[in-house]
Image (tube, grey):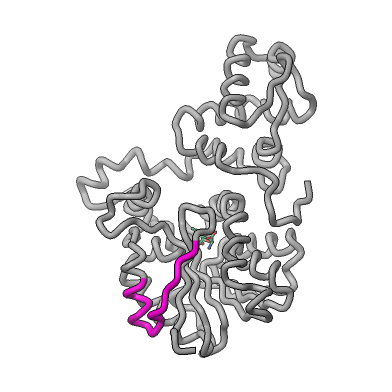
Amino acid sequence: MDARKLSLDFDVAPFLFCLDSVRGSRIVRAAVELGVFPQLAKEAAPAERVAGALRVSVRGTRLLLDGLTALGLLGKEKGSYRLLLIAQALLVPGSPDYLGDLVQGSILDETWDHLTEAVRKGGLEEPAEPVERQKRAEEFFPVLIRFLHVVNRTPAIAAARALGAGTGHRGLRVLDLACGSGVWSLAVADADPEARITAVDFPGVLAYTRRYGERHGLAGRYEYLPGNVQEVVLPEAHYDLAILGHILHSEGEGKSRKLLGRVAKALRPGGRIAILEFLPNRERTGPLDPVLFGLRMFLNTEEGGIFSAEEYAEWLAEVGFPKVESFEIGSHSPLLVASRGTD
Ligand SMILES: C[S@@+](CC[C@H](N)C(=O)[O-])C[C@H]1O[C@@H](n2cnc3c(N)ncnc32)[C@H](O)[C@@H]1O
């Protein structure tokens, strides 16, 4: 496998299902804890041989391996189990996209046990630190962005295409705000060989962004601006494209509107704002993913939430970007592209 390559050779849907369902996630967690994936990376084998190597029960192993096969992570031929590409990439330690620790830990789920109490009191007291604050962000996001880098790679390539990177638009000056791994701007940089990216995030996260740039052979096109997106000094009328990838939901309405105002000033005439967000309908009755994500924001942030396309369009119009287009990019979150409409 070529670790520098941005495109994926597999569909990540089975892994998403595993993370979202209790049974799926517990089966994968048990397999990670028992060392099933590195064992099968050594050789394809029947249940008896895997159980012997791991010193565990044959009966349990057979059921576990069949479960992993039904979940789409293993193949089974003539009683012998082998890793499918998705398991090789995501669940064998040492792989650049390894997510076994994410399955083992409870980073995504720890706060859900307190939902009742949070609804009762209007928020969570523990953990006291919401994820948008630097200290918590620097603990939480280095793990989460590894997951986002896998899930968003294919949509990011589609988004770069929709933005005309390297085709209608060359030499883009890009501001990637709350960049995480930089997945969205990496795809732009890949498509537009003259693009230059300024990546903003907390310093403890930017250290990881640099590594992704190096991994994909695009680090030379990046400069880094460490700090809080609400506070870093942005040059005026400088950028052609500002990317806001899954950041407005954790900021919430007030801070998002403020941030959009700052971004608008940083854009040149003809500049565009690209937003990737979970978008519920106006009534917040669906689709399911965005609506459930709203509760995650309630549990993990101070003011975060989910906002409809119409709400974003209203906020964008307020800062002088009334023309908003939406593009399907093969993700739960469409790409919204806003421009001044007069350029
Ligand atoms: C959900 S991740 C999204 C990362 C990336 N944009 C993507 O879409 O994959 C949110 C990112 O925003 C960063 N972040 C959150 N609040 C921030 C703030 N106030 N200032 C700077 N970065 C922030 C986090 O460190 C994290 O890397």
| Residue 90 in sight from this viewpoint | yes
| Residue 205 in sight from this viewpoint | no
In the rendering, at what x and y percent does residue 340 appear?
Answer: 44, 84
- Which image quarter: residue 278? bottom left
Question: Is 262 one of the magenta-colored residues?
Answer: no
Count up the numbered dots: 0
Residue located at (52% from left, 35% from top):
18
Front one among 72 and 183: 72
Range of residues picked out in magenta: 313-327
In the rendering, at what x and y percent does residue 88 appear?
Answer: 71, 37
Residue located at (57% from left, 71% from top):
163
Residue located at (71% from left, 14% from top):
79
In the rendering, at what x and y percent does residue 255 appear?
Answer: 35, 72
- Side (left or right) of 181 relative to 221: left
Judge whether 327 appears above or below 23 on screen.
below
- Which image quarter: residue 85? top right
In the rendering, at what x and y percent does residue 204 appear?
Answer: 58, 62
- Which image quarter: residue 170? bottom right
Front one among 317 and 246: 317
Front one among 237 and 58: 237
Judge whether 197 appears above or below 146 on screen.
below
Front one among 315 and 305: 315
Question: Is 320 one of the magenta-colored residues?
Answer: yes
